[in-house]
Amino acid sequence: MRKSLHKNFRARLWFPGLAVALLAAPRVHAQYESDWTRNFRVGILTGFNIKADFHTGQNFNLGGNKLGDPTQPGGNHVFDDGYVKLDQTGNAGGLTANWGYDSADQVSGSSLLMHSTTSFSTTSRSGTGDDTPYVGFDMAYGGVIHRWQQMRLGWELGFGLLPITISEHSSGPATINRRVFSYDTGGIIMPAAPYRHDANGTGPLIGDTATELDSETSDGTDNSKQTLDVMLFPIRLGPTLFWDVAPKVGLSLGAGPALGIVTGSYKFDDALNVGGTVTHHKGEINQTDVVFGGYVNATVTYHAVANGDFYLSAEYMPMGSSTFSGGGRQAKLDLSGAVYVSAGINWPF
């Protein structure tokens, strides 16, 4: 959902509509109201220089798979390179037609070998992802504390919403440990690999109970995709200095403390390849974190109509890093150099 929001959040309907409404208003109301004491603005927020650092350890345990116990009759068992499941007869006579396999190498005489990965190890790897810019939403509310001539001293509270999705791909050698199971084919003529059959209909039958053989260790590769998919809510509060540069143009400078709420997930998908057989190890780590920092910004406003401005703002908001970790994996969202640009509508009143 957050990834979909990141790709489609453009506010293409309401922002142009507001702009047209402001420009179409009677020109007699375009005089600048110099006595305003409050302002509220909303706009589109774009984030730059936001990065993520990914790091994977060496040893990973896949003990959470749902293989079940293939050495017991009946049941549905899915392996790295095939499956043996219940058919429409309920595996009458200890035989099933609902099975499939991937490679001719799995056939050994009258036996069909199935494999299930239990753990794997890789070299320690690191990578960095940066898919900027990111597009979101920004709003702020402020007030005037003191004024003199064309200057105003005030304050501003700002809030933003920024979906962030950063991915990184890496690959390398892997050592993969697998359990091995043998199914009796009864000497049938084996269908050519790859073969798939479902629970309905007729087809060649094999025994539905496996014999577990010694586990094996194989050399293979690990093609890994890691994704940090989060929502950032930046919040800022600080003093502002506003200058009436011209009757319709204003310049505001601000600075102060800031914090960011980071919530989302770190997702990973390891594609383990042994001799052409690929199995995927997927998972995700979810968390919510708070990071702290500060900001400085500059905002230009153009007075278009009575109580209506266009604004353009640039902001530097360095904050700390948010780290997602677990099971020998780590993803760090780096906000130390974040720069934001926003534009929209401002209402002085």
Image: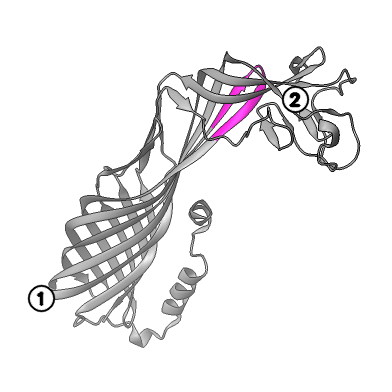
Q: Nearer the viewer, mark 2 or mark 1?
A: 2
Segment colored magenta: 270-281
**Where's the C terminus, which quadrant?**
bottom left
Distance, label 2 to label 1, CA atoms, is 78 Å
Q: Quadrant of residue 194?
A: top right
Among the 4 quarters of the image, the one containing residue 94: top right
**Relative to 61, residue 139 above or below:** below
Q: Which mark is residue 147?
A: 1
- For label 2, count other residues whose C-alpha is less than 10 Å away and answer few (under 14), some (14-19) or many (20+): some
Which dot marks residue 66? none
Whole-percent x, y for residue 72 in the image: 69, 31
Disc 1 marks which amino acid?
Arg
Residue at position x 76%, y 26% in the image: 101
Indicate the amino acid at tag 2. Asp
Magenta stretch, overall SS? strand
Q: Nearer the viewer, residue 31 or 64?
A: 64
Report whether 99 appears left or right of 330. Answer: right
On the rendered structure, is 142 left or right of 212? left
Secondary structure beneath dot 1 equals strand
Dot 2 or dot 1: first in sequence order is 2
**Residue at (43% x, 77% y) in the render:** 23
Left or right, residue 289 beside residue 142: right
Element type where label 2 sits in the image = loop
Disc 2 target residue: 102
Q: Is residue 274 magenta?
A: yes
Q: Which sits in the foreground, 246 or 203?
A: 203
Q: Nearer the viewer, residue 40 or 299?
A: 40
**Residue at left offset 26%, top offset 80%:** 32
Q: Does 146 appear in magenta?
A: no
Above or below, 155 against 27 in this view is above
